[in-house]
Image (cartoon, grey):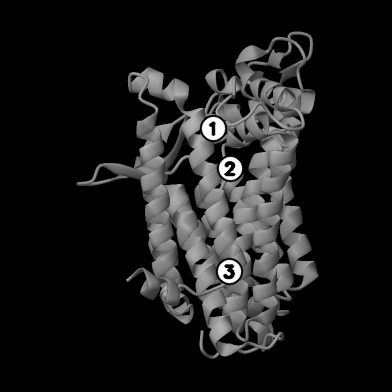
Amino acid sequence: MEQGILNKTKGDKVIWATVILLALVSMLVVYSSTGLLAYRYNKGNTEIYLFKQVVFITLGIMIIYFAHRVNYTIYSRVAKILFLIAIPLLIYTLFFGVRLNEGSRWIRLPIINLTFQTSDLAKLALFMYLGRLLSRKQHVIKDFKKGFLPIIIPVGIICLLIAPANLSTALLIGATSLLLMFIGRVSLRHIGATLGIAAIPVLMLVFISMIYYDKQENKMKDLPAILEAGRMPTWIKRVQNFVYNNKEADKEENYQINQSKIAIAKGGLMGLGPGNSEQRNFLPHPYSDFIYAIIIEEYGLMGGAIIIFIYLLFLFRSIQLFRKCPYAFGAFLALGLSFTLVIQALINMAVNVNLFPVTGVTLPLISMGGSSFLFTCLAIGIILSVARNVEQLEAPKSIPIDDEQA
């Protein structure tokens, strides 16, 4: 039976290897970083979190396996349906979802009583749909009405629905979509105009953050009522912390990043060793948002560099798939999903080393399991589905303009 499963396991062997490596790292670091959580909620039983992570990894590998066995052209057929399902789910989440930190990102599933982040489903559905549109619009891709508008409108809808509760994810999706459009031969003039329009609210946020900051008191000034809505105060505070980089004891606002810097400093070149992290007892969410800081503390800068290399290797192999895939849909699908995973990883790592404002995005395949972990595995399974079909077809390196099979 095991031999039969191995024989049916196809796709890029290097991508499979990167997934297994990241999963092993995840088990080690999640087990190490959940000690305080275990003592707080489970009477010191740290094994329960290791068991949960092993369960999530097992489920994730099963999802990857079954997803990669599906012919990737089927994902083209369901892309529009998933996209249309994602929109009402995002609207429902926005108004009736589980609220945390003034943001509503999750919905609770009935019967099983579990929560999942609808933006993960929307992100996956969007890139499947975007790959379909780009492959089918190649003959009119330079035309504004026939080519650009049908592609940018779905991206705008998803980003606008996600942004109120999760601005960082919306920006990530938007940036990845524009990058995919650039590769898909969309007019640079249209992409540039979109970037200009999208930059307006971002620059306004930075401008407001600078206006409402008291340099003498090292804190945010009182905001007018119009800026107190939703997560606006959180966004303003995060931009202020990053721009002004308070050296003084603005502990409440800068606590996370300060503890992350301490963890990185303690790690040095070779680290303190597996399970020897000290900052896991002080760093908020060391098992999710700031897990990369724990990796550097325990495995040093060398360990952190190896993690970056693994993600870049994953991206490199996905780019090779793009070049080999004989059909445009498969090429765009693999590239879009791999870009969003790797860019998310790089943003998470940049936050941990204070090169980017705190965002709350997790480290794909390494942060403690949840719905995001499973959707990441599904995305990887789809990428491997493209790779499996490329192997079977012995695809040429060029991508034809028309994709009849998708």
- Give me the residue at 71% from left, 52% from top: 309
- Residue 330, compared with residue 366, is above or below; it is below
Towards the viewer: 386 or 84: 386
Towards the viewer: 287 or 185: 287
- Tell me residue 372's x, y (percent): 46, 48
Please name the amino acid that badge 3 sits on.
Answer: Lys
The residue beneath circle 2 is 167
Helix, strand or loop at mark 3: helix
- Give me the residue at 69% from left, 59% from top: 313
Disc 1 crowd, CA 10 A, few/some/many (<14, 14-19, 20+): some
- Asked whether residue 256 appears in the rendered view, the answer is yes
The residue beneath circle 3 is 13
Towards the viewer: 100 or 306: 306
Mark 3 or 2: in front is 3
- Give me the residue at 60% from left, 15% from top: 252
Mark positioned earlier in the residue sequence (2 or 1) = 2
Mark 1 or 3: in front is 3
- Tell me residue 279's x, y (percent): 60, 21
- Tell me residue 302's x, y (percent): 74, 39
Proximity of marks 2 and 1: CB atoms separated by less than 8 Å: yes
For the residues labelled 3 and 2, the Cα–Cα distance comes to 35 Å
Please name the amino acid that badge 2 sits on.
Answer: Leu
The residue beneath circle 1 is 231
- Residue 291, compared with residue 94, is above or below; it is above
For the residues labelled 2 and 1, the Cα–Cα distance comes to 9 Å
Q: How many marks?
A: 3
Residue 176's tag is none
